Image: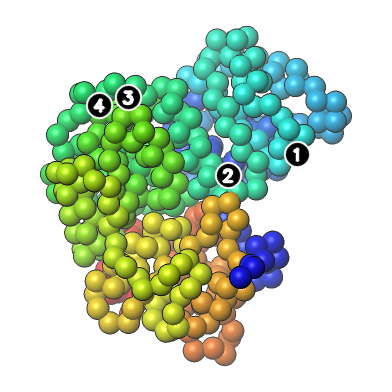
Amino acid sequence: MAFDYQTHVFTSTYTADVSGVCSALYELGGMSVLHDPSGCNSTYSTHDEPRWFDTDSLMYVSGLDEITAVMGDDDVLIRDVVQAARDLAPRFITLCGASIPHIIAFDYRGVAYLIEKECGVPVLPVATDGLKSYVSGVGLALTAWLDRFADPGETRNARPGSVNLVGVTPLDFSVNGNVGKLRSALEDAGYYVNCCMAMGDTFETMEKAYRAKVNLVVSSAGRRPARHMKKKGGIPIVEGLPIGPEQTGAVLRAVADTMIDGKDRTAWGSFGNTGRWTVPAGGVLVIGEEIFARSLANAVNLLGGAPAYPFWPDEDEGVPEAELIAAMRGAAVVVADPLYRVALKRDGGTRFVDFPHEAYSGRIYRASLPVFCGPDFSVRGLLE
């Protein structure tokens, strides 16, 4: 069946990959340069980044103009970045970009090499195109950072019971206490959180990322770096997000089992659907980032009652709107960001439960985003 991913009448889009790059590396002491005429940078800073007004970070846009793009004059960018690096002395530089550099085939690796040669500061080329979601951008950025700065040989110094939280940014977890609850869910169970990629941790902590026994991937943005670390250091992977007591228990059991046998696991059951777009009518439909949607749906199912099913966007292509709307209108309850409400008929029988997602609606509903991580969150209360 062919789906139309391009035309959206009712639904919005998720945060772009360039914002994902900036968000993932925001706290690590680097300088992020977004190669773009301007626009994507202001969208990121004003809508996608809740740390912008109270936490310093070096974020810059190149100001790419038409004549520079047409003539392919990369010397302008190189000169500006080198001068900024000399003035500000960042730990590293990240070079990413939006759609125009992609269209003109901008050479990220080549320009990164020239900048680093000129100023001596490590440069990470992250070839984004502004057309994919933040999931892709976060994954690419963290993987590039780990490949450059983290030593796989640190696995020999791994601490027993140590866990990395992978894929943690405000785009999925905001700044309302979710990250603290996420850490405490592991620590209260006796585990040691080696590092939190990459929110609330430092450059020095992240350098020791390979000292973990298990990588707990708590959002799909963490899959790429976790798979990279498994390839380089053999660290096994658990996917799952602790939401409410039952799902927290499922995640902790998966981590414990993986600590013992080293096998990759997911902390959710079967939902009875054969694919992302085939959702049975009735029950509870959970829309959002994949690991969140799967984990919350599993938490609902562990309570008993109406079955729950996850529905998530593809990181490259998004969501086929017609299939999404059909799934929403066939559900008894929809749990999703409030911006999805417009896709439901006003006279329909579906009940909508607001669950804001920073990567979808930005700052609009930030104040009403619940602290959903950990055993204290009531999944039953959410649905009542």
Which of the labelled discs sits on residue 103, or is there none?
1
Q: Which residue is mark 4?
A: 155
How far is mark 3 from mark 4, CA to CA? Answer: 6 Å
Residue 11 at x, y = what percent? Answer: 62, 67
Query: Given the image, on which type of amino acid does mark 1 rest?
Result: Ile
How far is mark 4 from mark 1, CA to CA? Answer: 41 Å
Which mark's residue is nearer the viewer, 2 or 1?
1
Residue 53 at x, y = what percent? Answer: 51, 40
Crowding at label 3, few (<14), some or many (≥20) Cα neighbours within 10 Å? many
- Residue 109 located left or right of residue 159: right
Which mark's residue is nearer the viewer, 2 or 4?
4
Residue 242 at x, y = what percent? Answer: 28, 56
Crowding at label 2, few (<14), some or many (≥20) Cα neighbours within 10 Å? many
Which mark's residue is nearer the viewer, 2 or 3?
3
Q: Residue at x 61, y 34 (%)?
A: 127
How far is mark 2 from mark 3, CA to CA? Answer: 26 Å
Which image quarter: residue 212?
top left
Q: Are marks 3 and 4 in contact (CB under 8 Å)?
A: yes
How far is mark 2 from mark 4, CA to CA? Answer: 30 Å
How far is mark 3 from mark 1, CA to CA? Answer: 35 Å
Query: Given the image, on which type of amino acid does mark 2 rest?
Result: Asp
Q: Which residue is mark 3?
A: 152
Q: Residue at x 56, y 68 (%)?
A: 339
Q: Earlier in the sequence, mark 2 or mark 4?
A: 2
Which element carries disc 2, helix, strand or loop?
helix
Q: Residue at x 71, y 22 (%)?
A: 77
Which image quarter: residue 163?
top left
Query: Given the image, on which type of amino acid does mark 4 rest?
Result: Thr
How far is mark 2 from mark 1, CA to CA? Answer: 16 Å
Q: Earlier in the sequence, mark 4 or mark 1?
A: 1
Which of the labelled discs sits on residue 17, or is there none?
2
